[in-house]
Image (cartoon, helix red, strand yellow):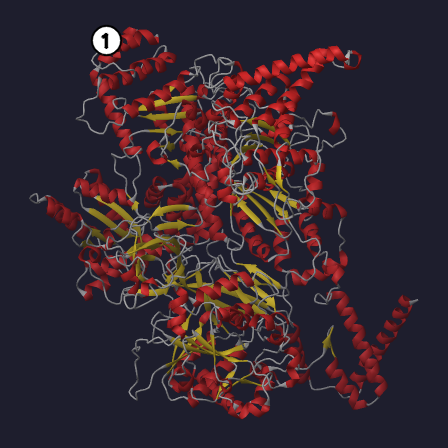
């Protein structure tokens, strides 16, 4: 019926509309044609969908050459050899038309990187080369290497400044297309002719008469900065070197050979480069020069016909490849940068914040037709006017009905995408988005579209889609392992931070992976092997658990078995059920039962100690409680004849005194006797009676005092007589039962039973007596043997008593107390919990499957011995040698263990000098280990006995001997020469270890000992003598070994090197024996070498000959060499990964309904080199950012990269998760002619909503707006006249960030220390100990928060320096500890530090800026000094702590009078700080500034945070400053990555008001006043400026209390705030004074940031961030309360105090929510006058056409 009524109403209204329209047309009341056209145009403009275009330009440098960028990409991705191949290819190419430049460059790149394979064996590499080509193209499309080219340009400019003395000539040389420095004495050339001359002269200088050593040393000191090499220099290879050298190596080589060093700054492809390069290459062949290329394209090169025709000029200065068109505006030459995102958030308009003067202007321009009501083409305003002329209220009502019907139809057509959704529909949005994405034909594109347009899509999704049960179930299942909404991303297993990842970061990482792939390929392996290597993940890095020890040794025996014992038969065997029960209980209900031996504990205990007994007691309690933990007891005694219980006060007599045991024999200890008893029972009766014996003696102790809730009972120590009694009781029962026959006890007579019992007891007492008589530890003594073997088994494995092995993981009592603060028995539950977490993970990731044996699984990978120095890589980080060419592993003579005809995965260098005692012992242990590989293991002997079926470790090793004898002059002994000869034997090599061991026996004075050794070993005597007598060969081999030691080991005297891992006994402070070699080899196999072996052997099997026949005849020595080299490479790769952690493979997660995979291994078996795995919430900010980046990566690399994305949505949302639109600028990297920009297409955005723009860009970028006509903070598209809104941002600097720490006190960073960035790295400054004035370009202080600091920079080379003054007085740099960190590739390199210890070199050459770690130390005499205290020497200030300093500050301590600069009238400059965003607040800001100027005579300087200021305001500021006679400066500071971030723009602005006061201003500024933008000043600011803050770092005005209407809104008077403030006032943050000097002295900023970081993680805290934080912190960072008249606000203050107000703030009124503009005119009488004044002047400047053409007359920070 309802539907029928609707249809009837619609029909009626439609008929009415036809009649109405006809009537209006015939009535004569129609307006003129022109009027109708105007209205129609206006209506069209009103409803037309608008688009937005946003671009980003680099203000740091102009656009760079695509060809030079390609060359740099090739160098980085593929190595210097291919860089020079590209230069060669480029030089020999024929010229092409500019239209084809991109294809031309790509063709040259493909030929250089990976030309078409000519040989069959090269075909397997073709795909990898294509991968490299794709990566290079992607990086060039991103302009990845443009900053590096700018860095080279900076080096050139500095070199010109240094060598060209004539100022007129200097500019000419600077702009020359080619420039070269020659030699070390300031020679230079700009063309080949001058280069010939300068090289000739430099050669003559080198050939001068030889100088003294001192002069030579002075000559070799670099006097020019250009002589300092960079890591990016391109050194031209000489014909003599097989390896490409790096810049610093070339520099050192040139010095050593006395050759002139030429640095050429030029563009490859230009004529001058071709000429100069050809000349230099010729001179290098003649060995007359060394040559380094630093690519630079000068604008003058556009006049070089060769550079233009060969496309070198393409892209430079935005040259388009066709003509040498000069850009009219310098801005047109700037580089347009991709790789940024734009977010348009729908703004909360609770308080109107739109500038009405903009709307008014639009109304003036558009006439009075702004209120047109257009619905589906009907203009109802016009219809109403015409209908009103004819009269009739009924018609008007029908018209309203008709309008409503059309609105309903419009809504049904378009959909009301912003209609609020009910909570129950919001709840499922995450699941619905998951379904929509995963089910799409192109899920990656759908992920991007959903995340970027979610506000427009959510209503349709919520109203038309339904959640599928299988999707919900899969999400729930996965979230058992991964918390809801968590985000994880990894590239080949290495984590990437989703909150900072961008296209540049991923491209850098991809290129880094390709470099690693190339290194694997140089080992001789194919592409598939390289991919498998890159996909490996370190074992144990994530858990960092203690070492795991094999517990299957004798005499370990468990007394019960969950899988076999009948009492546990009702328990479930299912691992999945166990996991489910654990997840449901969330660890609160204990361990659920499982009929598997899943948790196994071996308790190694001394039953004569309280700790040992308590360990057993706890484990027995678990057993009785049916907790699925089984345990075995290994009783160990000791010879300590006293029982000490001082650490356990619950044992003893209750008064701390020991109770003597009279029953204990004098020659024995209780623990030894009990251990003998325990092992006797174990050996004869089994583990269960032994457990009963231990429990009986523990529970049989006398209780001296009862325990209570807080403490256990006081127990007496055990007595031997009680232990004897327990032993007899348990053994007697078993013996009697055995003697009488089991089951026949009742049929035996009492007499017989008595006789048997007496006999058994006598025999048992005899046993005990003999135990007491066995004084010495002797395995031949029957009753001591078992206990002694157990003790030795423990000692040989490196274990101690009172320890446990939980699933093999070792924990001892001492470590437990040190790390957990509790005894081992009390920490047992915690330790078991950590093991259970690992088991849960193993079950969930399907490593532990239902058909697998639990005990075998948990014991997998366990070592035979505990050696923390080897196994525990978290406590003892391993040292790996730099990678060694794999040919080394092939060419040298190795001694193989075991069979000679098989590959050996473990290659060990033995570094030892057999001529010294320690070296002899070291080599002996190696030979013992090697000999064991040939021996048949005896029963129970040898670490290599393979109980678990594993191959003997020694049989998988091979050895290479290195004698590290340091000097050629020291003549080796016969022993040393004989050992070398022995290693060269070609037959009977299995006897070499025996021969070496015989040779190492003392043969001093006996010339025949060598012959005896040969005879004893079994080697062929003739072969050995021939080798031994060949002195020339022996000498050569000894010299070679010394060279190897010097080159690769740094002259180590004694060491083992296991597949590249260095084990130096001196460094580790321990010696290694044969059993330790077993451990280290086993550890290497487990962690690296087994994986390497599988990859190498699989690669060898897959090699094919031209006929396609598989061959497996690769020599075993080559297989062994490749395994060693690959294992070494893997180790180095893992070493880098350890600092970041590792993301495990996501294969364990269910992915049928919640994931998609793209580009996995193809049908031909090819493996993707790059494997990316992502877990993300599809409706998160992270997904918004990462989805387009992944799309770019996949489009660029295709199937060379595989991508797996798993959705992890919140199952039930409580609020809309995304309220913003997003676009990323990197859509098409394949077409270089397109200018990168972000485009929000027409129709993709709501036209009537207020949008606020936010630029998302890489963390190291400092970006600000450059061009924007409209208010990007309050953008309403329907008010925009144009079809497209254009905006342009500017990249102004790249950040140098870092963390500094005090080497003498690592826990306390050197807070307050001032650091500066200086213009260049002047080497002559270093040696002459002088500084260049005005050399600093930026400065800051080091925070206490992580020692963090940041400095703005541009690409180039700089000096990071301690600022002169207090910082240099107290601190100096530690010369070797400045570390450059490459976040993207996770590599580290040492930076050069100034010998003066105050400066260090910094090179900025990428979009990632530079991040460093800097180690400082206090200078001699300043060890107790505080850098923030200027008067340490007065009154022992250096001995006082921070607390006493704060007290003295408030105690009125005399302070030195500061030096202030006054103007000509004797007035001090007042500094005022403010922040604004959006046109409305910029309008307020102008009014505030004018009001300050009106009432203050002092000179004024305003400081504004530039981040959010509009371009029009920044252009207007110079004019305003001139008219009102004020100064201004724009400042900024980048939000640190480690500080918890805000996502809402308004809260970010609030944070900037308070969090960075100590670092955002120049260090010279000592005071500043903050004034809110919407404030009107009526008082003289000089009065506020000079107010005494009485030692507080800042002063705020307390909140008014006299407007009673607002009482309900005064939150600080109730609840948390009332309690927290403890009577202190709550202050308002609209105006405050900051004493920056005191603020820094008190480290107030550090304290505020620390509190903020903790509080802000709770979304409910810090609602008014800029206000709540200082008020919360005022107990630690005190606030001086300013007089109340300094801030009046109508919302909180009564009208009776308004007249005395010195400032009036237009704060929001939560009661009325009155718009700002309305309130301003009503509240402040002079506001309209001030507004008119500044608006009139603004209009005047706008009409003058000066805006946009004015630059500030000063540098901005």
Which image quadrant for residue 48? bottom right
* Residue identifier under label 1: 1008
Q: Would residue 1351 appear left or right of 917 to someone viewing this image?
A: right
Does residue 653 show up? yes
Identify the residue at the far right of this view: 1
Secondary structure category for the residue under label 1: loop
Q: Would residue 1013 appear left or right of 207 to someone viewing this image?
A: right
Viewer-proximal residue, 1420 or 1030?
1420
Image quadrant holding the N terminus, namely: bottom right
Identify the residue at the far left of this view: 209
Q: Residue at x 82, y 78 (%)?
A: 401
Measuring from the top left, give residue 1437's x and y in whole percent.
32, 66
Query: On screen, 10 above or below 1127?
Result: below
Does residue 894 show up? no
Query: On screen, 1192 above or below 611?
Result: below
Viewer-proximal residue, 1302 or 777?
777
Measuring from the top left, give residue 203's x and y in whole percent.
13, 45
Measuring from the top left, give residue 1366's x and y in whole percent.
29, 65
Q: Residue at x 35, y 26 (%)?
A: 909
């Amino acid at each position: 019926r309802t539907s029928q009524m609707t249809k009837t109403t619609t029909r009626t209204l439609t008929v009415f509309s036809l009649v109405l329209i006809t009537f209006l047309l015939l009535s004569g009341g129609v307006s003129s044609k022109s009027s109708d056209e105007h209205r129609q145009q206006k209506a069209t403009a009103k409803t037309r969908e608008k688009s937005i275009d946003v671009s980003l330009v680099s203000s740091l440098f102009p656009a760079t050459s695509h060809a030079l960028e390609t060359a740099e990409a090739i160098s980085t991705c593929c190595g210097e050899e291919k860089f020079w191949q590209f230069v060669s290819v480029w030089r020999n190419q024929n010229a092409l038309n500019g239209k084809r430049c991109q294809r031309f460059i790509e063709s040259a790149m493909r030929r250089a990187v990976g030309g078409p394979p000519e040989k069959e064996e090269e075909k397997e590499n073709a795909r990898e080369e294509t991968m490299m080509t794709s990566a290079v193209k992607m990086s060039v499309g991103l302009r990845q290497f443009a900053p590096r080219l700018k860095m080279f340009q900076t080096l050139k400019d500095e070199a010109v400044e240094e060598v060209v003395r004539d100022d007129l000539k200097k500019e000419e040389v600077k702009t020359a297309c080619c420039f070269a420095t020659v030699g070390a004495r300031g020679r230079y050339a700009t063309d080949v002719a001058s280069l010939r001359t300068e090289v000739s002269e430099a050669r003559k200088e080198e050939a001068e008469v030889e100088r003294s050593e001192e002069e030579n040393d002075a000559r070799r000191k670099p006097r020019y900065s250009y002589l300092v090499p960079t890591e990016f220099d391109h050194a031209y290879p000489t014909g003599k070197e097989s390896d490409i050298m790096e810049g610093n190596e070339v520099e050192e080589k040139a010095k050593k050979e006395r050759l002139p060093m030429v640095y050429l700054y030029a563009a490859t492809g230009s004529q001058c480069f071709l000429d100069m390069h050809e000349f230099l290459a010729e001179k290098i062949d003649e060995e007359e020069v060394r040559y380094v290329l630093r690519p630079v394209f000068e604008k003058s090169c556009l006049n070089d016909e060769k550079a233009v025709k060969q496309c070198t000029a393409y892209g430079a200065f935005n040259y388009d490849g066709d003509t040498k068109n000069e850009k009219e505006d310098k801005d047109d030459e700037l580089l347009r940068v991709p790789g940024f995102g734009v977010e348009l958030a729908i703004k909360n308009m609770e308080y109107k914040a739109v500038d009405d003067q903009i709307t008014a202007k639009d109304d003036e321009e558009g006439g009075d037709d702004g209120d047109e009501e257009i619905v589906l083409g009907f203009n109802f305003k016009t219809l109403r006017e015409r209908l009103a002329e004819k009269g009739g209220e009924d018609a008007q009502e029908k018209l309203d009905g008709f309008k409503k019907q059309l609105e309903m139809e419009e809504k049904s057509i378009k959909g009301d995408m912003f209609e609020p959704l009910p909570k129950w529909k919001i709840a499922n949005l995450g699941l619905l988005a998951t379904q929509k994405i995963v089910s799409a034909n192109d899920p990656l594109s759908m992920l991007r579209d959903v995340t970027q347009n979610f506000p427009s899509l959510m209503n349709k999704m919520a109203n038309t889609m339904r959640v599928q049960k299988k999707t919900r179930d899969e999400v729930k299942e996965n979230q058992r392992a991964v918390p809801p909404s968590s985000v994880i991303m990894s590239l080949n297993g290495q984590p990437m931070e989703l909150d900072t990842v961008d296209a540049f970061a991923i491209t850098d990482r991809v290129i880094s992976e390709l470099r690693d792939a190339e290194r694997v390929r140089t080992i001789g392996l194919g592409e598939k092997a390289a991919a498998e290597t890159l996909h490996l993940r370190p074992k144990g890095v994530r858990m960092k658990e203690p070492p795991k020890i094999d517990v299957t040794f004798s005499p370990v025996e468990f007394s019960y078995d969950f899988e076999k014992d009948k009492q546990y038969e009702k328990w479930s065997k299912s691992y999945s059920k166990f996991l489910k029960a654990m997840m449901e209980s969330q660890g609160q209900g204990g361990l659920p039962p499982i009929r598997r031996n899943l948790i196994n504990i071996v308790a190694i205990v001394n039953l004569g100690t309280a700790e040992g007994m308590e360990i057993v007691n706890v484990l027995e309690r678990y057993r009785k409680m049916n907790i699925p933990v089984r345990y075995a007891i290994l009783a160990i005694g000791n010879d300590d004849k006293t029982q000490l219980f001082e650490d356990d006060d619950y044992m003893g007599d209750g008064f701390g005194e020991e109770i003597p045991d009279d029953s204990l024999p004098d020659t024995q200890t209780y623990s030894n006797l009990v251990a003998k008893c325990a092992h006797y029972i174990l050996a004869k009766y089994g583990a269960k009676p032994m457990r009963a014996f231990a429990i009986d003696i523990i529970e049989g102790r006398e209780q001296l005092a009862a325990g209570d809730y807080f403490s256990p009972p006081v127990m007496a120590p055990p007595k031997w007589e009680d232990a004897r009694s327990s032993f007899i009781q348990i053994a007697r029962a078993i013996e009697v039962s055995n003697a009488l026959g089991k089951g026949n006890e009742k049929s035996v007579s009492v007499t017989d039973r008595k006789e048997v019992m007496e006999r058994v007891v006598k025999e048992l007492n005899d046993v005990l007596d003999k135990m007491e008589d066995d004084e010495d530890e002797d395995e031949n003594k029957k009753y001591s043997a078992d206990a002694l073997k157990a003790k030795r088994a423990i000692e040989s494995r490196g274990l101690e008593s009172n320890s446990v092995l939980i699933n093999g993981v070792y924990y001892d009592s001492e470590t437990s107390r040190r790390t957990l603060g509790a005894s081992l028995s009390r920490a047992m539950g915690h330790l078991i919990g950590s093991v259970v977490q690992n088991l849960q993970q193993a079950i969930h990731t399907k490593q532990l499957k239902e058909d697998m044996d639990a005990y075998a699984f948990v014991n997998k990978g366990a070592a035979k011995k505990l050696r923390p120095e080897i196994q525990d890589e978290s406590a003892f980080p391993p040292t790996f040698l730099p990678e060694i060419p794999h040919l080394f592993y092939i060419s040298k003579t190795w001694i193989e263990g075991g069979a000679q005809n098989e590959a050996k995965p473990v290659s060990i260098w033995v570094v030892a000098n057999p001529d010294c005692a320690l070296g002899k012992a070291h080599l002996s242990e190696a030979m013992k280990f090697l000999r064991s590989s040939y021996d048949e293991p005896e029963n129970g002997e040898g670490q290599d006995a393979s109980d678990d079926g594993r191959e003997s470790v020694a049989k998988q090793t091979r050895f290479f001997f290195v004698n590290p004898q340091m000097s050629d002059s020291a003549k080796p002994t016969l022993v040393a020469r004989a050992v070398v000869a022995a290693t060269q034997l070609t037959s009977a090599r299995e006897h070499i270890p025996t021969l070496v061991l015989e040779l190492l026996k003392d043969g001093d004075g006996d010339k025949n000992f060598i012959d005896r050794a040969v005879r004893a070993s079994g080697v062929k005597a003739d072969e050995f003598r021939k080798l031994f007598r060949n002195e020339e060969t022996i000498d050569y081999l000894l010299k070679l070994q010394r060279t190897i030691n010097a080159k690769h080991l740094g002259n180590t005297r004694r060491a083992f090197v296991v597949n590249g891992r260095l084990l130096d006994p001196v460094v580790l402070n321990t010696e290694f024996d044969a059993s330790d070699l077993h451990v280290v080899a086993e550890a290497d196999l487990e962690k690296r070498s087994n994986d390497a072996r599988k990859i190498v052997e699989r690669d060898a099997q897959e090699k094919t000959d031209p006929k396609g026949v598989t061959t497996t005849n690769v020599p075993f020595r080559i297989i062994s060499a490749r395994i060693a080299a690959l294992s070494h490479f893997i180790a180095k790769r893992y070493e880098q990964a350890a600092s970041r952690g590792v993301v495990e493979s996501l294969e364990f997660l269910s992915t049928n309904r919640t994931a998609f995979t793209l580009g996995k291994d193809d049908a031909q078996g090819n493996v993707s080199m790059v494997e990316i795995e992502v877990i993300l919430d599809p409706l998160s900010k992270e997904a918004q950012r990462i989805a387009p980046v992944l799309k770019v990566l996949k489009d660029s690399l295709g199937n060379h990269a595989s991508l797996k994305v798993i959705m992890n949505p919140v199952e039930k949302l409580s609020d809309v998760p995304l309220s913003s639109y997003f676009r990323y600028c990197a859509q098409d990297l394949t077409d270089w002619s397109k200018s990168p920009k972000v485009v929000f297409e027409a129709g993709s955005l709501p036209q009537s909503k207020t949008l606020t723009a936010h630029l998302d860009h890489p963390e190291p970028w400092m970006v600000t707006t450059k061009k924007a006509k409209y208010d990007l903070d309050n953008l309403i598209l329907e008010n925009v006249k144009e079809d497209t809104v254009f905006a342009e941002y500017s990249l102004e600097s790249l950040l140098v960030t870092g963390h500094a720490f005090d080497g003498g006190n690592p826990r306390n960073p050197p807070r307050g220390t001032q650091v500066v960035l200086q213009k260049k790295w002047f080497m002559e400054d270093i040696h002459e100990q002088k500084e260049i004035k005005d050399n600093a370009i930026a400065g800051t202080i080091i925070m206490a928060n992580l020692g963090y600091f940041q400095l703005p920079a541009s690409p180039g080379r700089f000096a990071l320096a301690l600022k002169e003054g207090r910082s240099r007085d107290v601190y100096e740099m530690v010369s070797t500890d400045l570390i450059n960190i490459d976040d993207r590739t996770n590599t580290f390199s040492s930076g050069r530090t100034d010998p003066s210890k105050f400066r260090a070199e910094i090179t900025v050459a990428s979009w990632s800026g530079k991040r460093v770690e800097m180690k400082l130390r206090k200078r001699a005499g300043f060890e107790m000094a505080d850098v923030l205290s200027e008067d340490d020497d007065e009154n022992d200030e250096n001995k006082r702590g921070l607390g006493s300093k704060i007290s003295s500050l408030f105690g009125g301590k005399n302070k030195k009078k500061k030096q202030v600069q006054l103007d000509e009238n004797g007035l001090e400059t007042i500094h005022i700080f403010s922040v604004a965003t959006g046109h409305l607040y910029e309008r307020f800001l102008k009014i505030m500034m004018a009001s300050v100027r009106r009432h203050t005579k002092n000179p004024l300087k305003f400081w504004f945070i530039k981040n959010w200021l509009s371009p029009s305001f920044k252009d207007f500021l110079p004019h305003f400053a001139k008219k009102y006679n004020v100064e201004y400066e724009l400042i900024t500071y980048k939000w640190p990555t480690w500080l918890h971030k805000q996502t809402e723009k308004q809260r970010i602005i609030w944070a900037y008001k308070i969090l960075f006061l100590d670092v955002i201003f120049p260090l010279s500024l000592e005071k500043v006043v903050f004034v809110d933008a919407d404030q009107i000043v009526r008082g003289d600011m000089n009065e506020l400026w000079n107010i005494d803050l009485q030692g507080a770092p800042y002063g705020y005005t307390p909140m008014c209390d006299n407007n009673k209407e607002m009482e309900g809104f005064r939150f600080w008077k109730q609840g948390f705030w009332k309690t927290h403030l403890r009577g202190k006032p709550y202050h308002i943050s609209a105006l405050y004074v900051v004493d920056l000097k005191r603020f820094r002295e008190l480290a107030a900023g550090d304290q505020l940031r620390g509190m903020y970081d903790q509080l802000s993680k709770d979304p409910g805290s810090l609602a008014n961030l800029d206000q709540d934080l200082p008020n919360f912190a005022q107990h630690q960072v005190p606030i001086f309360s300013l007089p109340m008249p300094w801030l009046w606000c109508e919302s909180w203050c009564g009208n009776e105090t308004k007249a005395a107000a010195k400032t009036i703030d237009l704060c929001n009124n939560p009661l009325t929510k009155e718009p700002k503009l309305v309130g301003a005119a009503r509240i402040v009488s002079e506001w309209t006058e001030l507004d008119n004044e500044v608006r009139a002047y603004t209009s005047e400047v706008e009409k003058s056409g000066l805006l946009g053409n004015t630059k500030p007359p000063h540098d901005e920070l």
